[in-house]
Image (tube, grey):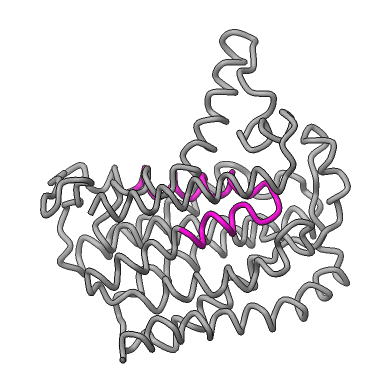
Amino acid sequence: MNINYNIVLPILISFGISVILSPLIIPFLKKLKFGQFVREEGPESHLKKSGTPTMGGLIILCSIVVTALIYVKEFPNILPILFVTLGFGLIGFLDDYIKVVMKRSMGLRAWQKLLLQIIVTGVFCYYIMTQTDLGTRMRIPFWNGHYLEVGFWYAPILFFVVLGTVNGANFTDGLDGLASSVTVLIATFFTVVGVGLKAGIEPITCGAVGALLGFLVYNVYPARVFMGDTGSLALGGFVAATAYILEMPLFIPIVALVYLVEVLSVIIQVVSFKTTGKRPFKMAPIHHHFELSGWPETKVVAIFSIVTTILCLIGILAL
């Protein structure tokens, strides 16, 4: 019965905080004119979204953090996940603040953002390698009970995986409800796995589920608020950190394949254009390609969510 309480209550607590905070914070963001800046080179249909309040990731962050703090004494394993989620969320907040308040459209400079991300990742890596008994191994998908021992390469791989996942989540946040819908499914997957492995992290994974469900009430099409980098970077950090605490970074390409495809589509688009002068996609990230191919925004979100659901089920089989 206690297990049920530790699963259900964090979802309800976080959902309640998210739903209650949203109608309070959204008007506040509007009043401060913290509106979304829509790039002119983006899809024309998105221009009407200009001015929609952004930085709604604060709602997600507050919901997850408050819920996690209630349980952190009883579930210390959630601490590193909370640190990474909050750390990347604060980086995203700085980026959003510079964009919408200081009116510098690019936000933090690329080197500033990368440096801050490396610092947060470095602290997480140090904690994993010195304060836990996780070692330098990773679960191998579809080979139950077997691990890949990477030894010296553990830290470089961790940096690559964490930074890649964070920026993948960031690229995914481009349509109403897309990043929220995809990530709530991934968080649900980690909850199921965490409970099954008795990892002691369910309060924060459930907290993420509740926070995103509450946020989706206001973020589904037509969105009344966007999460901004505050939310997308935090969610990417959450996914990466949770995967490492569960020794499952090799599962990220399975359950978070949407993140990976979004990043790859941008890389392919840029490299192809610079080398051949041709663009393989109508627009990158790839969700915009489908939009410009005639798919309604809601259909893109639905299909990506369905694909993620199937991938999460495959991820469970891969255990």
Name the spot of residue 312 as percent of width and height, x first: 39, 53
Name the spot of residue 221 as percent of width and height, x first: 75, 56
Q: Main secondary structure of the magenta part?
A: helix
Residue at image point 57% right, 78% down: 63
Asked if one can make out residue 271 in the rendered structure from this viewpoint, the answer is: yes
202 relative to 182, above or below: below
Please say whether residue 166 is one of the residues in the magenta stretch: yes
Looking at the rendered image, the quarter that the C terminus falls into is bottom left
Seen from this angle, which residue lies furthest bottom? 1
Residue at image point 71% right, 36% down: 295
Q: Quadrant of residue 19?
A: bottom right
265 relative to 46, above or below: above
Residue at image point 67% right, 61% down: 227
- Asked whether 130 or 268 is in front, the reply is 268
> Magenta segment range?
159-185
49 relative to 180, above or below: above
